[in-house]
Image (spheres, helix red, strand yellow):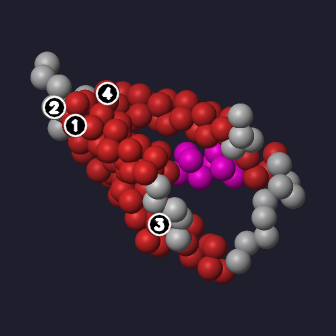
Amino acid sequence: MSVWYVPALLAAVCMAGHYLMLRAAAGRVGDALGALCIEATAAAGILVFLLLRPGTEAPPTAQGVIWACASGLFISGVTTLVFTALRLGGPVSATGPMVFAGGVALAALFAPLLFGEAFTARRALGVCLGIASLVVLATERS
């Protein structure tokens, strides 16, 4: 097992908890305020992580900070729009995978163009399977 698998799997567990807690909050708080609560709490949690693990971070570059902030703008859009989708009745079992796996599929398609990553037959198959699973989940009838 590659060394990155463990943090990736733990991140998946955190993502599942995120979607479940977000679903519980949707409709009980405004979409933008709920997103702000999530992002502010996330920032506080990351600050605690930084304080508990001093010296473990790579030295920042200006370009790295700019790209990280740009990513934050996208994630604020994600959070607000997921609140909206859930408040409008999207089931967490379809909304969460649609957002997360849809984003992963799009990133897998664009990463070769932007970062020179290989686009192999295996990656193409994974993207197709991911999109197929999204269609199955998104079109489920109650």
Residue 28 lies left or right of residue 100; in this view the side is left
The type of residue carrying mark 1 is Val
Mark 3 vs mark 1, CA separation in Å: 24 Å
Dot 1 and dot 4 residues touching (CB under 8 Å): no
Tell me, yes or no, if residue 14 can be seen here.
no
Mark 4 vs mark 3, CA separation in Å: 30 Å
Category of crowding for the residue at label 3, using alpha-carbon neighbours closer than 10 angstroms: few (below 14), some (14–19), many (at least 20): few
Along the polypeptide, which appears first: circle 4 or circle 3?
A: 4
Along the polypeptide, which appears first: circle 2 or circle 4?
A: 4
Q: Which residue is mark 3?
A: 112
Mark 1 vs mark 4, CA separation in Å: 12 Å
Task: Give the image location of residue 69, x and y in percent.
Answer: 53, 69
Between marks 3 and 1 in the image, the one whose residue lies nearer the viewer: 3
Kind of element beneath mark 2: loop
Dividing the picture into quadrants, the one containing residue 98 is top left
The type of residue carrying mark 3 is Pro
Dividing the picture into quadrants, the one containing residue 93 is top left
Q: Which residue is mark 1?
A: 135
Between marks 1 and 4 in the image, the one whose residue lies nearer the viewer: 1
Along the polypeptide, which appears first: circle 1 or circle 4?
A: 4
Task: Give the image location of residue 124, x and y in percent.
Answer: 39, 51
Mark 2 vs mark 4, CA separation in Å: 11 Å
In this rendered view, identify the residue nearer to me: 41 or 8. 8
Residue at (41% x, 28% y) in the render = 20
Q: Which residues are magenta?
A: 40-48
